Each structure stands twice: as C-alpha cells, then as structure tokens.
Image (cartoon, coloured by chain):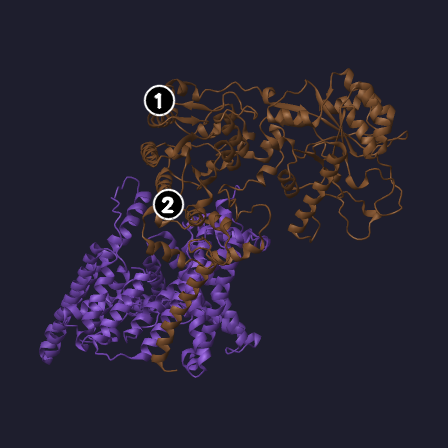
Amino acid sequence: MSFTSPVFLGFILFFLLVYYLLPRRLQWVVLLAASCVFYISGGIRMIAYLLITTLSTYLAGRLLGWLNEKGAGLSQEDKKLLSGRLRTQKRLTVFFAAFLNFGMLYVLKYWDFTAHALGRLIPGSNLPVLNLAIPLGISFYIFQSIGYVVDVYRDKYQPEKNPFKFALFVSFFPQIIQGPISRFDQLAGQLTALREPNFDSIKYGIQLTMWGYFKKLVIAGRAGVLVDHVFNGGTKYDGSVIAFAVLFYCIQLYCDFSGGIDISRGIAGMFGIDMTINFRRPIFAVSLTDYWRRWHISLGTWMKDYVFYPLALSKPFGRLGKFTRKHIGGTVGKIFPTSLATFIIYFIIGIWHGANFRYIAFGFWNGIIITSSLILTGFYSGVRKRLGISDQSRLLRVFRILRTAFLVFIGRYITRAPRLLTALSMLGATFLNFHPERLFDGTLLTLGLDKGAIITVLAGIVAVIYVELLQERGIEIRKSLEKRSFLVQWLAILVPLTAIILLGILNQEYISAEFIYAQF
Amino acid sequence: MSSKKWIVIFFLSIILIFAMVAGLNILVDPFGVFGDVLMDWYSYNITMNPRVAKIKYLDRHYEEYDSYIIGCSATSSFPVNELNSYYGASFYNMIMYGADMKDVELTVSYMLENYIVKNLILNIYIDNGVYYDQGEDTLTNNLHPKVSGASRLSFYGKYLFLNPRYAISKISSRRRDTYLPQPFDVFDISTGAYDKRARDAEPIGSLDEYIRSYPVFADYPEARIEMSQTDYCIKSVLTIINMCREAGVNLTVVCSPVYKDYMAYFDPAQVADFYTKLAEITPYWDFSMSSVSWEPRYFYDGTHFRNAAGTMALARMFGNDRVYVPEDFGVYVTKENVASYLETLLEVPEITAENYTARVPILMYHHLDYEGNDTTTTTPETFEAHMKALRENGYTAISIEELVSYVDGNGQLPPKPVLITFDDGYLSNYELAFPILEKYNMKATIFIIGSSVGKSFYRDTDYPIIPHFDYEQAREMVDSGLVSIQSHTYDMHRWQPFEKGAARTSILKLEKEDENDYIRVLKEDFLKSSAEICENLGIHVDSLAFPNGQYDILSQAVLTDLGVRVTLSVERGINTVIKGLPQSLYAMKRLNMNESIDTDKLLEALCS
C-alpha cells in the first residue's frame, strides 16, 4: 500500500477513527493491527523476515536485560570475578543478534552483488545468483532493532517485556518503509501511551502530511519524469542538459524522501505520536559534515552512536592514533584515525543505499571531501584571517552553502547514473561539453515534461526553499498562521490542497488528441 | 480558528475542490460522456474518444440515420454521401480508430437494439486478426458501459475526476477552431467519418514528389506481425452475422485495401488462413490486395487508403462504370472461390503506370503584343512558332474537359497532350492569339477576371490598363469550339499599386481577416465569376487559375467544396494526372511562356 494510493488514505482514516473510539488501553493494539495490515498488504511472505528480526532482537533484549540485572545484583567481590564473563556473554548476545540480522540483510540485499563482482574478479567462481525479493523497509527495521539491542547492552534502559509491544516498536507502520530510524526510548513509550483525541496534534499531523504530499506528488513526481528521461538516454545529451537533469534529481530526491518522511511523521502525529525528525533543511548546510547532520539525520546519528564512536574509541583505534601521531605527525597524524573511521562510516552509508559500485564510490566521495576539509581546516581559517573575513560573515555563509550544494550535486551524478562509468562520462560531459545554449533552444521541452510541468517543479522548489528559509530563521510558520485571519488560514489550506489534488492526484497521464492523430 | 474547526474546514475544502473539478468536467465534458450541454462540440468529443462520444451523439440523433458502416480507422475512407446514393439510405460512419472486432461486435449489438438499422457494412482490416479486445480501460479508447456492460460507477468516476487539463484543453481549442479540421476535431460530425477535407485538398502529382512528401513510402519500416487473434475475430464476425440475420439487417462485409509493404509484415499462411476462415462464414468484397495496393498515391499513409480509393471500391461493388476502377480492384469472395482467389492474392500484379497516369504539360500565356518581353508578353510570331512546333512535334492541345474525363476514367488522352492556357483575358488573346489557334486548330483555355471583362481602365479608376476582351468577343471564341473560358476569380486579382490600403491581390485570406468572412468572400467571388461566365457563354465553370499562382489548403478546400475540379498554379513543372485521384488536378503546374522562349526552349521544357 503506497503512501500515495487512495486506499492508504482510507486506511488511515479508518484506523484513526478506531484508535480514538476504542477504549484507550486498546490503542496500542490498534496500532499493531494497523501495522500488520499495512505490512501484509505489501505481500504476506515478507512478514517472515520481519518476524525473525522482531523475535531475535526481542529475545536478545530480554537476555541482555537478564544479564544486566544479574550483573547489578552481584556483590563487589563477585563482580570482579564474574564481570568479565558477563561481558563476554552480553557481547556474544549482541553479536548473535547482529550476525543473524545483518547476515539476513546481507544475503537479501548484497549477495547477488557479491556473486556478480566475484564472478568478474575471479573468473570461474560461480556463486549462485539468488534474485531474492528485498522485503519492504528491511534496512530500516533492522537498524532500528539492532540499535535497541545495543542500547540494552549498554544498559541505557530496560528491555521491553511484552513481545507484542516490542513488535509494534519494530513494525510501526508510518516509519517501517523509509524510516526515520527511531530510538526505543523515544518511541516505544509513546506507542503504548493512552491518548485522548487531541485536535491540535491531528491538525498538525494533517498539515505535515499535506506538506509531504505536496513535495512528493507535485514536485518529486514531475521532476522524476525528466530525470528518468535524461538518465535513460545516457550520454547522448550535452553537459548543460545533464546538469539540469541532475539538478532535477536533487530536487526529486529531496522532495520525495523528505516528503515521505513528512507524511510518516504527519500520520504518526495524527495518532498523537511525535517521531524523530529526519531532515533539517539540508539545503542550508555549510559543509558536507553539516549536510549529513541535516540529511537523513536518523541514519547519521545511528551510524555515529553505533559505529563511529565505538570504532573511534576502540582500543585498536587508540593505538593507531598514538602510532600515527608519532610516525606521521602534524595535522594528518592527528586526524588519521578519525579520518579512517569517517571513511568506514561513509563506506557503510554508501552501501546501505544499495548494492552497487556506484554507492561505494559515493561513500568514498563523501569520505574524501570530509577528510580533506578536516585537513584543510587550519589552512581555511588562515586564509580567512589574512583576508579579514569574519567567521560570522553572511557572505561566507552563502559561499559555504553554495560550495556544499555543489559538492552534493556532484555526488548525485554517482548515485543516479545507471553505472559508475556512465556517471563519470556524464560528469565529464558536464564540465567539458557544457553547451549552455541547450538550456534555451527548446531541448528541455523534449525531456518528457512540458513547459507547465517544468515551471511547476521550479516554482514548487522555490516555495519549499522559502518555507525552509523562514524555518531556518526560527519562524514557526504554523504557529504564526494561527494568528492570522480566517481567510488567510483557509487559503493556507486551500492553495496547497488544490495544488495536491489538481497537480498531484488528478494528474493521470494526459493523452493529447494531437498525439493520437499525429499523422492526420 | 480552533483546531477542531480547522479540521472540519480541511475536510470541507477537500470536498469543495473535488466538487469543483467534477463540475468543470461535467460542464466542459471533454469526452462528451455527460451530454456536453454547454459546448455541444461533438466533433471534439468524438476525436477524444470515438467509441463513447459517437454513442452519446447517436443516442440523440439516431433517427437521422438508418444505415451504418463500422470498423477500424480504414472504414472512414468509404465516403458516406456515395453510400447514401448507392443504397438510397442515410448512413453513419461508425469508424472507431484502432477498433478490434470485440469493440465492433459490442457496438453492433448496442446499435441493433437501440437504433434503426436497415443496412450494415462491416469493414474488416487485416489488423483485426492481430488485435482483439484491447485498450478497454484508457480514457481515449474505452467503450461506453452501455455498450460494454462494464461498471458505470468506475466509468463515470473516471470522467468525473479527470485531469483538469482535458477541460482546459477543450476550452482553449475552441478558440483555435477553424473551418478545416485540426488535430483536436478530426471528425465530421454529421457523417461520423474522418474529416479529410484538408488532406484531400493536397495536390498529388508524380510518384517522386509524393514519396518526397511522405517518405514512409520510400523507406517502409521493417517489422513482422503475428496474426494470433484470427479465431477470436472470426467468432465475433459470426456473432455479428447472426445478430444481423435475426434483426433482418442487410449486412455487407468488406475487406479494405492494404498497402503492399504493410501486407509484407504478415506471414502469407496466416493471411490465407484469415481470409479463408472469413469466407467460410460469409461472402465478402475483398479489396485488400490489388494493383491499388502497389500505388502509394492511393494511400494517406501505410495503413490508411484514400477516400478516392474508397470511391473506387464502392463503384466496383455497385457496378458504377462512370467511375474509374482498376480492373483487378475488388473481388466478391465466397466459400467456393476463396481457394483460387487466395492463390493470386499476394502475387505482384502487372502495373503499367502508363495505363492510369498521364504526363500533361500546361503552357501559360498572358498577353500578346508586337513587342514581347521576357516576363508575360509574347509576340504573335513567337506564339505562332510555338503552335507550329507543337503541331509538328506531335503534340495535341487538349481541353480541361478532356483532362477531367481522363482522371474520372471516362476518356483517354492523346499520346502527347498539352494544355494551352491564357491568364487574365486580354483583348490580344482574341485579336492576335485566337486567329493563330484557329489556323493550327489548337484548343486553349482562357482564365478571365470577372471584374475586368471588356475593360481598358483599372476598376473604378481612370488608370489605363492592357485592354480586356468582352463577352461578345469571348462568345465568338467559344463558338469556334477551340476556346474555353474559365475563372481567374471575379475580383481577387487586384493590383496593389492602383489601390489605397491592403487589397485582395490573391485568393489567400488577408492578414487579420476573420476566417468565416474570408470563406464567404471567396465563395461569393467564385459563384459570381462562374455565374457570369455561364450566363454569357453557357459554360459550366469547373476550373480556376489562382491569381499570382498563390493558394493554400484552405482556398483549395473551399473551391473543392464549390465543385471546382481543376486549379492551376504558376509553379514551374510538368503534371502527372492519375486516374481515380481528383487531387492530381489540384494546383497544377505550368510552364510560363513569353518572348524569351523560342521553339527549342519550348520543346525542351515539354520534355523536362
């Protein structure tokens, strides 16, 4: 059941009514039932993987909780004696849970890629290709569940005892397909809380959902047509047209993903649940590091908490740090371990996106830029000082935003092109064969979108940027709207709603008679 | 406002927007499913979806018709007015583009139940063996649920909540609507057929020129098509036959012409299977393959034969020998003769272009004077030399009547025909040229400007002009039997230097002139010109030389409407006229004659 299908809206309306009409203590059961219906509607067989993850991480959590309690109950003497053993047991538990789940993820998502890659590297190594269907949202719910296991391992909170409540945490329908990756301590309590109907949160939920649909249906859906057209055409286009398509891809990706997250958070909001944010206006990022703090935040913090810090603070990395400081020295020696961890993180983020060399290259691209900016930090501040530019300079900020946008833009070539080599040749075309006149000679109108649609996308993204600019300045748009006249408030409903309905929902493929009778 | 109120208003707004969309779609009704009360523009609706809108149209107008011809787009090329006169009936052309036999079966069933049907012509095209029961769910191709039995709720829902672009496009098209069909209104509302006035106004000449205009015929794309649906198609045809028998309807089955390169897509065994199975259940008129299939000029494109070929097909069916029909075009196929017929079906016919085409040069003279020039004036000596050279070299001067008879298939042309024409109607034509024509016994046609007959001064002024002969003198020439007088318009050949403001110097629409006004002016002008000529000389005017040679599709189409058979341009070249194709008489090319053309140049030009 796609977020954009009419059935989905009916589904939400139905469960929303049931949720607020039934006795409060049954509310979490309603959510679980809705989640089951939602997930099963995507194919019943896929639920097996979800059950494996739920059960394994539930049991791991319980076991860790038991071990935590056991450790806490020990006397000082026993602690000395047994803490090592307990820690090993706990680590083994985490290891098994992680191995099972990541192993499953690997087989489902990356096995065929490995088989192909190995087949090319070592001719004759005929690993079978499985062609397994990838279950909906598997990366998201596995990351979320493993985060829970690690947190319990770290004794941050008590494990969930009720397996059904835990199942709801793993499978909560607004987030299961595309995140955000939630934390148990933030979400689980909200899922099982007893709630009175709260019109404020329902209204906020509707508003957020509407904004999400606007971005997804009006902007992203259109932009995608042009993007597909150009990227399917490969390298036959001149640089400026390719760059235009990549720009549209940036728009499409942001509006589709953040729009989807807004819909998720908006729907959760209607049920009174506040889900973690996943985007914080990435367009205003001043560096690539800042960008990753604003883009797909829940993945970034997950990586930071469960991979980066454990790695960077681990003993081998400590030793490596000492070694490089001593033998390499200088800035490079100082930041080497951090850079290495950064590379590893972005490598993982890269392949998290999908099994392809493109994503590995994408990971490296980010790693290289971020590491080099770490190295160049001193140099930059020197240059600024010599030029007398203040760190607070608005111009500097604009420059940094544009520079970051450019770096992200380049990275998008890599993730969107069908193959890494195509991406490189398209990049090459952009810089060596730009032909700016193509942007004005009507070529853009041959890429699957008419003038109106291109204007809609551009006007849409301008609206999005404007709203985000206001938010970036700390203006709470929805709150300030409430103070305005009835007419303004009504227009704030009517305008986006009309755009969504006319340009998004009733936007079936338009068949022009001119097309049918082209030969007439 | 409170959040509760906000939520209520939100849902009301959704309802409001959908209601407005539905209202727009009902009022503008781009597919004509709701009755199109406001715009009542069925030629547009039928263009968008002929299956649905034709039913909606006929539901209101079925009493005007008692006979139908039905099938895919090829069906359109059987002219309805000719069907009416052959059958003495009132036909509606139920062509539905891309129709498969399932569409046809369901539609026939609906028509038999709801309309008056005396005669039904079922047109079967080779594609009916390829596609069956397809495209039912698209806005442009689905059937009306009354016909298909599909869910009315989902049908009306679909058209109620259409993409508003359809409605906007209909409104904006209305403003761009013109006399001739445009891509948004390709149907003729009263006959149901494609409105081919624009395509049928295009001049047709030599094969080379035709292929240059329609390159598809030179380089026909290669493909193979499987006829996998033959059995389904035949089953539907049988159902139609049985329904007609029960209802007492006079059913005729016709297989329409297929262009030879398109036929080559199919496996001959499958083609034979298709036609054999058809013959087993019904006799039919087969036009699918013949010498016509080998002549691209009888086709609009690879899958659509011209209305002119439709005229020939009907003439064959009804034994009308006043219309040209190639001998091998059309065979009545029955169970008994199908086997022997199929043996010859895919054979290459013997085609001799000389049998149905003729090369006709047309000489264009203007004024004769003792002082010639190299634009439009010829001395009597040179003119006489021309006539002598033509005579001596075996050319025969023909009349326009002979030309038309040839194209209609009612007469042959002499071996080396030439048409001699004079534009404007100068007195010198009578004083100097006519005696020479008489001397060499040469026929000629003079195109006169109605408003300047007998005049020596420019209209309404005292500016002297080259004198023009009067009707008295014209009658003398006509009575000789050598000269015919035809139209060069009544008053659409004005001379700008003698005019204040923009003048009508040609037959074309003036800039910024309203199209309807222009058509009215053009019609009135021609009718006045032809009426005067007829009144004074007793000649039926069916030819017109375009002033300055300027014309366009619109002017040609209007003149065709008025019964003009031959039009002449000033484009240099030699014409190819083709039997059965009236378009080969449109905008005919001419060779301009003046003092600079000696007899050698003349003879050379005639051969070029």
The answer to whether residue A326 shows anywhere in this view is: no
Q: Residue at x 87, y 42 (%)?
A: B457
Q: Which chain is purple?
A: A
Describe residue A368's horizontal placement relative to residue A78 as left or right: right
How far across and how far down the image is residue A344, in percent? 33, 61
Badge 1 and badge 2 in a common chain: yes
Badge 1 density bin: few <14, some 14–19, many ≥20, Cα 10 Å: some
Q: Residue at x 34, y 46 (%)?
A: B148
Assign the N terminus of chain B to one quadrant of the image. Answer: bottom left
Q: Name the secondary structure under disc 2.
A: helix
Residue B500 marker: none
Residue nearest the observer in this picture, A474 or B238: B238
How far across and how far down the image is residue A310, in percent? 27, 69
Of all chains, the one bearing label 2 is B
The amino acid beneath tag 1 is: Lys
Q: Which chain is brown?
A: B
Residue B335 marker: 1
Residue of label 2:
B114
Residue nearest the observer in this picture, A517 or A83: A517
Residue A176 higher or lower than B222, as above or below: below
Residue B443 higher or lower than B4, as above or below: above
How far across and how far down the image is residue B420, in percent? 75, 27
Cβ atoms under marks 1 and 2 closer than 8 Å: no
Residue A367 higher or lower than A477, as above or below: above
Of all chains, the one bearing label 1 is B
Assign the C terminus of chain B to one quadrant of the image. Answer: top right
Q: Name the secondary structure under disc 1.
A: loop
Q: Earlier in the sequence, mark 1 or mark 2?
A: 2
